């Protein structure tokens, strides 16, 4: 039809103008400041039916505990490690683990602060008394890790960002955060500069290369490579940031099925009601 | 509308109530017997969808409030506690934050529907203006709600938007300090925003009441834009016909809404809002929620702050004048071939402005948003007034029944009338 054609042309012209200005901008911007976008990794928890890999979360926790926790706080209660949908530690394991931490508590009845062994309800203790102290000793304050995997991102650009929301193959991209963590841990590509990172915005990062192959012992025979460590710790951090993921997707499937059936029933009811009405 | 009710109470208690407060016959007249044009399409289900979303926001919001703490050092943590420790808290929070987006998505479709089918024209001007007021209240509510989790984007979004008031000549700075309750966005700001965020949705409920009242006085518009002539021939009773169709529309909408809640819950939000507010650290790009982006793009397209603010508010206010800016006697774009083209260009401009609002205000993006901002206003201020004077419209059917007949009756006669209708040139 004539209109549709004209609308099409008009729309195309407008989009063209926008795209053009976009391109000129990219051209101006280009060069040294750009970081490449991290590649999309495969994760067990991606997609509509994704779940966490318990063994991977346990390995990731080990990496966190032995390496990252020296600088980064993880502000979640220790008991979460035993919650359903998580790394799957048993209650006893969580208790034993909690007791290995020393928690500063108080004031007691005498009005004094004291140290005691940790309990599952305690939060993982922070390595520094406050962010200022951390910044003073490390050059910048390491971010708290409880939401890190949801709070960092990179721009996907048009049109990729549209497909990221959709239930299509290659769509439903929700793992930007873990991909970026993985990329940063593998992004120390300048031998001579331990604070240069290919994927960190601006490339200068106060965190020197924190992980190297063989640094953490794995007892289950998983290769102790940098890639494997980074994947495991990124998966662990995604769980820490989104502990309800498994429950969410499980309930989601039921809700969607219910709604689809309901939609079908309503559709035929509506059809019947309107059957004798020309409209 | 009055007098549609065929409600005859038989039960004694109902009779007793009816004699004192005829609320049941009122409900019956408004939502059961109420005559609905038979030719409504699915774009008309968005009214019901919006009512559903308003209630969904209130229900999830009230329950969230039971666990939320409106205090600047505790707010972020209380939202995280909702997400992690409150039973079903993650679902409530995701339903509420994505619900706001869905609410705006529906209202934009509802508004575009009104513009396409000329639903703002006499006698529905007041109905339309009430709609614009609801839209404004929704924007205020959404904006203040986004501040509540007290993340980086909450804080900096609030700072940028409240700072706009400082552009007002002479008293701007005083007004901004008064809005903040201090010399920057801080705990007092969070407290008042929370109070207002709780209050405004109920004001919206009241204005929606007026909106529906006005609707039931004038009757619904319809895709052919002709008034109801004969209730028996042109309409069907609201229940079960519209009720069933609206329910189906709501369920389809729920599928979309639940996709967001359960599968991509953080897609529409900004990752920066998972970082607690830090007044010492400005994020590299401060971007408002997606539903404000077209207006944000208009704001930034003008270098002068005051003029930008005026343009942004004018972009919303101009909607209220639509009934008088559009000079055409014909309502529906179905019978307005040139208007139809401009309408779609307008949609593309609005969406384009939304995209540009999310881009950094540099280089080509600024130029593009200027072009689209001019196009946005030109649609209302130039195209609509002139089009009514010059456009050759197609013959409008005499009644809804005729329109339906033309669609279903003889296909050949429809084709013939379409071919003989004056076509547009160029
Ligand atoms: C017009 C309807 C409403 C809209 C558009 C709306 C919008 C929003 C938005 C955008 C947020 C931020 C969500 C986030 O990013 O976390 C929010 C948060 C919140 N809203 Fe609403 N809201 C509405 C109604 C209500 C009502 C009626 C209440 C209470 C009675 C309420 C209570 C809350 C609370 C406690 C929060 C903070 C918790 C959170 O951030 O999830 N809202 N609202």
Image (cartoon, coloured by chain):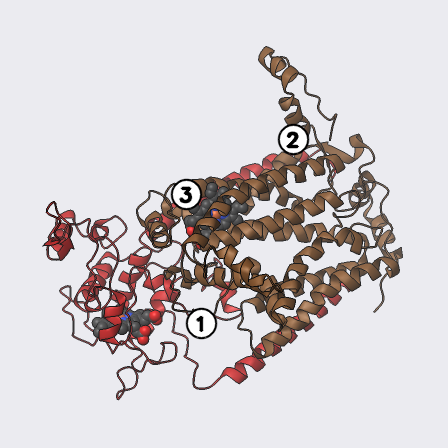
Chain colours: A red, B brown
Sooner in the amino-acid sequence: mark 2 or mark 1: 2
Q: Give the residue drawn at x 85%, y 51%.
A: B329
Query: In this orientation, which residue lies closer to the viewer: B50 or A50?
Result: B50
Q: Is residue A228 left or right of residue B215?
A: left
Identify the residue position indicated by label 1 in the image. B284
Identify the residue position indicated by label 3 in the image. B65
**Residue B135, position as x, y percentages in the image:** 62, 50
Sort mark 1 into few (<14), some (14-19) or many (20+) by Cα contacts within 10 Å.
few
- C-alpha distance separating marks 1 and 3: 31 Å
- C-alpha distance separating marks 3 and 2: 32 Å
CB of mark 3 near ligand 1 (< 8 Å): yes
Sooner in the amino-acid sequence: mark 3 or mark 2: 2
Label 2 residue SS? helix
As drawn, the residue found furthest toward the top would be B12
Label 3 residue SS? helix
Please say if B42 is above or below B312.
Answer: above
Q: Is residue A271 left or right of residue B78?
A: right
**Residue A50, position as x, y percentages in the image:** 35, 56
Q: Is residue B382 left or right of residue B210?
A: right
CB of mark 2 near ligand 1 (< 8 Å): no
| Mark 1 and mark 3 on one chain | yes
| Mark 3 and mark 2 on one chain | yes
Q: Is residue B172 visible?
A: yes
């Amino acid at each position: 039809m004539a209109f549709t054609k004209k609308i099409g042309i008009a729309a195309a012209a407008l989009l063209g103008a926008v795209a053009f200005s976009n391109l000129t901008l990219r051209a101006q911007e280009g060069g040294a400041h750009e970081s490449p976008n991290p590649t999309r990794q495969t994760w067990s928890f991606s997609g509509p039916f994704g779940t966490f890999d318990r063994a991977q979360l346990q390995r990731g926790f080990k990496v966190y505990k032995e390496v990252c926790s020296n600088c980064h706080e993880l502000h979640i209660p220790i008991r979460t490690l035993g919650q359903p949908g998580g790394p799957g530690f048993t209650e006893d394991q969580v208790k034993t683990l909690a007791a290995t931490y020393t928690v500063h508590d108080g004031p007691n009845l005498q009005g004094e602060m004291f140290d005691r062994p940790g309990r599952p309800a305690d939060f993982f203790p922070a390595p520094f008394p406050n962010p200022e102290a951390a910044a003073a000793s490390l050059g910048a304050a390491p971010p708290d890790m409880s939401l890190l995997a949801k709070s960092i991102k990179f721009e996907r650009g048009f049109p990729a960002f549209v497909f990221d929301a959709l239930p299509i193959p290659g769509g439903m991209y929700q793992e930007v955060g873990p991909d970026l963590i993985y990329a940063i841990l593998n992004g120390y590509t300048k031998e001579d500069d331990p604070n240069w990172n290919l994927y960190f915005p601006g490339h200068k990062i106060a965190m020197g290369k924190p992980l190297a192959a063989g640094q953490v012992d794995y007892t289950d025979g998983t290769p102790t490579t940098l890639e494997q460590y980074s994947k495991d710790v990124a998966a662990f951090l995604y769980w820490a940031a989104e502990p309800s993921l498994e429950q969410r997707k499980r309930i989601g499937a039921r809700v969607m099925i219910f709604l689809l059936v309901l939609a079908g029933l309503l559709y035929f009811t509506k059809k019947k009601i309107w059957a004798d009405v020309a409209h | 509308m009055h007098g549609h009710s065929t409600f005859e109470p038989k039960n004694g208690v109902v009779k007793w109530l009816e004699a004192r407060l005829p609320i049941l016959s009122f409900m019956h007249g408004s939502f059961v017997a109420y005559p609905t044009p038979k030719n409504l399409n699915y774009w008309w289900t968005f009214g019901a969808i919006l009512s559903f979303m308003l209630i969904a926001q209130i229900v999830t919001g009230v329950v969230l409030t039971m666990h939320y703490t409106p205090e600047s050092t505790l707010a972020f943590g209380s939202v995280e506690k909702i997400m992690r420790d409150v039973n079903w808290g993650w679902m409530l929070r995701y339903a509420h934050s994505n619900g706001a987006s869905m609410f705006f998505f529906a209202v934009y479709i509802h508004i575009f529907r009104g513009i396409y089918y000329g639903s703002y024209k006499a006698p529905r001007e007041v109905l339309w203006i009430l709609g614009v007021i609801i839209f404004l209240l929704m924007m205020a509510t959404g904006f203040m709600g986004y501040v509540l989790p007290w993340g980086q984007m909450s804080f900096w979004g609030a700072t940028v938007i409240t700072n706009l008031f400082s552009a007002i000549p002479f008293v701007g700075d005083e007004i901004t300090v008064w809005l903040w309750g201090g010399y920057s966005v801080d705990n007092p700001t969070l407290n008042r925003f929370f109070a207002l965020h709780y209050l405004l949705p109920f004001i919206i409920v009241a204005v929606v009441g007026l909106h529906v009242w006005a609707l039931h006085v004038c009757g619904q518009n319809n895709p052919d834009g002709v008034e109801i002539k004969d209730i028996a021939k042109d309409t069907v009773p609201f229940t079960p016909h519209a009720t069933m169709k609206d329910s189906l529309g709501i369920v389809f909408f729920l599928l979309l809404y639940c996709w967001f809640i359960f599968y991509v819950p953080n897609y529409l939000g900004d990752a920066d809002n998972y970082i607690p507010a830090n007044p010492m650290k400005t994020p590299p790009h401060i971007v408002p929620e997606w539903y404000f982006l077209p207006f944000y793009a208009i704001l930034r397209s003008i270098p002068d702050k005051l003029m930008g603010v005026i343009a942004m508010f004018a972009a919303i206010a101009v909607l209220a004048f639509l009934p008088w800016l559009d000079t055409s006697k014909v309502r529906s774009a179905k019978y307005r071939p040139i208007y139809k083209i401009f309408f779609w260009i307008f949609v593309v401009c609005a969406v384009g402005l939304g995209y540009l609002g999310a881009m950094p205000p540099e280089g080509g993006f600024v130029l593009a948003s200027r072009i689209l901002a001019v196009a946005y206003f030109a649609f209302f201020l130039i195209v609509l007034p002139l089009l009514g004077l010059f456009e050759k419209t197609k013959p409008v059917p005499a009644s809804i029944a005729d329109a339906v007949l033309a669609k279903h009756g003889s296909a050949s006669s429809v084709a013939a009338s379409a071919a003989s209708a004056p076509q547009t040139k160029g």
